[in-house]
Amino acid sequence: AALLVAANFVQIFIYESTWYAMVIVQAVVATAAFYGNSMVMWSYVGAENQVDLAGVTASGRMWETISMLGFFIVMAVVSFATPWDAVGRARFGQALACLAGAPTLFMAYHKRYPIKKSLKSIAEGSNLYKEGILDLWKTIVKLGKTNPAAQRYLFTIMFTDAAVGGFTNLAIIYLSEQLQLSSIEVTLFILINLASNPIGVIAHRMLLPKVGQKRNYSIMVAGWVIITCLFVAVIAGPDQKYGSYAFAVIYGGCYGHYYPTTNGYFVSLVPEDKVVELWGWNMFAGVILSWIPPLVFTSINETSGNLRLGMIGMIGFLFIGFILSLTIPETSVEKYSIKSTKEVKDEGENNDEKADADSTDDSGDNQQKEAESN
């Protein structure tokens, strides 16, 4: 995280001729920081029941949306209000990212995350990397028997994450090339998309307690399949470019529903002591096939010149992900029941009182038996 902030900060002051190399450095550091932060963050995420888990994941997505949308709005205002060229705006964006990112990252890692005790110890004569690799291998090999739902989820996410991630990149090309949107119009599309994220977050918050993790996830993926098919079928060329803004709202809802649903579902499927370890596999599964939809898109576009046809790869991946999501074992593997925190606490207090009463009865019985024996 510190390297990421440093790389952005240095770029503000160096010549733009060096920016290509800096982008490569930032890509590597940002990827490592993002995955590392995800593993740390989700190891602290948990809840006693699905209702609270839905609230936690929904709240997290809302804060992410507010942050991204706020950054875009500030950059848009600066673009319109200043005479700066693209280089000047880029420098300002880097400075703003550092100003916002450095304090919040410091606060998170030094103030907000309490230190956790280690779950395992390293054998004498061994080392962290050797023990870690052996442990990861044992976990993934045995996962089909110990946690089949998590294993099936990882296969599902290989396709859904690749498709959703591919759409994030390919949609920009589709908007600018197929619909002939200008850079300002594309930026407006992105802003509308981000501003619509709360619609999906609210849908996630409402659906999860009612239908459960699996059905909520399947509904979300099915929505992506249907909306993407409609988008490619209806928004065909420059004549429909203003109709694309309606889909910006719909896709905003899809993104808002996607991230809290996938993250919350995964957390609910794995044991608490395996969250960090399996989160690494989760991220690996999410990117292992991410190169295929862009490759299919580019190949079809180069051979046929038809960008609409190029979206077939992404739709196919979404459909495969949907079919796989239906095969994930049902809620017997989930750790949460559809109860509120208050209900869970009340049940716990009642159980404690009952246990105390049973203990008192047992004590009386034992005393009576001892007297009879004497």
Image: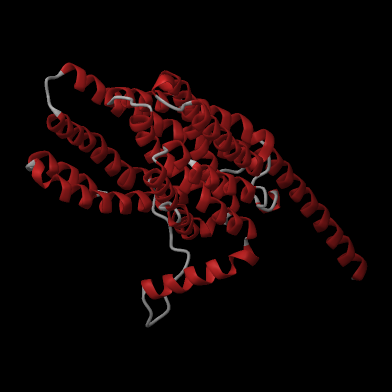
Q: Residue at x 73, y 46 (%)?
A: 351
Viewer-closest of 284 and 243: 243
Residue 249 in sight: yes
Residue lying at the far right of the rendered structure: 372
Residue lying at the far top of the rendered structure: 81
Above or below, 313 relative to 117: above
Viewer-closest of 233 and 264: 233
Viewer-closest of 163 and 240: 240
Which x, y percent locates residue 221?
57, 40
Viewer-closest of 207 and 360: 207
In which quadrant of the rendered view does residue 373 lie?
bottom right
Which x, y percent locates residue 269?
60, 52
Q: Residue at x 42, y 56 (%)?
A: 116
Please indicate whether residue 31 sits to the left or right of residue 7 in the image.
right
Please indicate whether residue 343 sits to the left or right of residue 304 in the image.
right
The quadrant of the picture occupied by the C terminus is bottom right
Residue 45 in sight: no
Above or below, 49 relative to 82: below
Which x, y percent locates residue 107?
30, 41
Which x, y percent locates residue 67?
34, 31
Above or below, 310 relative to 359: above
Above or below, 260 relative to 22: above
